[in-house]
Image (cartoon, rainbow, N blue to C red):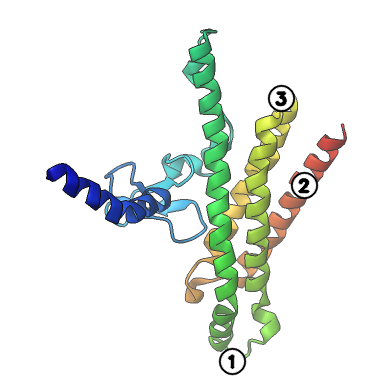
Amino acid sequence: KLLSQWREKCRNESETANWILANTKPCPKCSSRIEKNQGCNHMTCSSCRYEFCWICMGNWADHGSNTGGYYKCNKFDAGTEDNGDQSDAAKAKRELNRYLHYYKRFHGHAQAQDFARKSVKDTEQRMVLLQEQNSTNTWADVEFLKTANELLVECRKVLKYTYVYAYYLTDKQKLSLFEYDQEMLERFTEKLSELSEKPLQEMNRIEVVNQTRAVDRFMKNVLKYVEEGMED
């Protein structure tokens, strides 16, 4: 009887359970389930206020430019796993971990791209509200928000596919150079995402415009690198 009840519950709850597993993660500090409802990967637990990275689940303090570790989690590090064990099982484990590293980040940016698309749909309403905050604002004065959100969609798409490119890039020197450009694009994209998602009363137009220009420049650098690399 209990087993029948369990099976029935699983059938009824499986969709909810799958959604929770796909869209939430436990806080690394207090284990409370956290839903990601914006594109930025800088997360703050609502229960304990712990700040962490949605991609690697590491402490966000280790991702700051002041530590020199900003978005180093884009690089795959075999670490202690590469201990010289050449057995088939060890090789398979190393390859699986390497694949999962790239897949998690590919999937993370795919989710962020979906959030960015939703933000674009809501942008015009936010632009109207932003314009109404200051009677001297014209429509041209608030179009920076639309430009930023549309660029975020493109950046998330590019970043998503950078992990496909990096996965198949076997030249270690080229990979190292590519990962630098990838890291910079991620760093500036995350900052732009944070700035564009701020409450309207806290939004700084100049900051968003400058960050948008920087992100556009780094995205073009990545695309140029891939294009030139494909021609080699």
* Residue at the limit of the structure toward the right, as seen here: 231
- When the figure is inspected, residue 116 is found, relative to residue 34, above or below; the finding is below
Residue toward you, 96 or 115: 96
Identify the mark nearer the N-term, 3 or 1.
1
Residue at which label 1 appears: 135
Instruction: Assign the N terminus to one quadrant of the image.
Output: top left
Q: Is residue 196 visible?
A: yes
Residue lying farthest bottom? 135
Judged from the image, the secondary structure of the residue bearing numbered disc 1 is loop
Q: Earlier in the sequence, mark 2 or mark 1?
A: 1
What residue lies at 59% left-to-right and 59% top-to-bottom?
Answer: 192
Expressed as whole percent of the image width and height from the top left, the position of residue 221 reads 77, 46
Q: Residue at x 34, y 49 (%)?
A: 50
Quadrant in which the C terminus appears: top right
The residue type indicated by label 3 comes to Thr
Label 2 – label 3 distance at C-alpha: 18 Å
For the point 43% across and 39% down, which residue is it? 58
Instruction: Using the rendered view, name the quadrant where residue 105 is placed.
Output: top right
According to the image, label 2 marks what residue? 223
Name the amino acid, label 1: Ser
Mark 2, secondary structure of its residue: helix
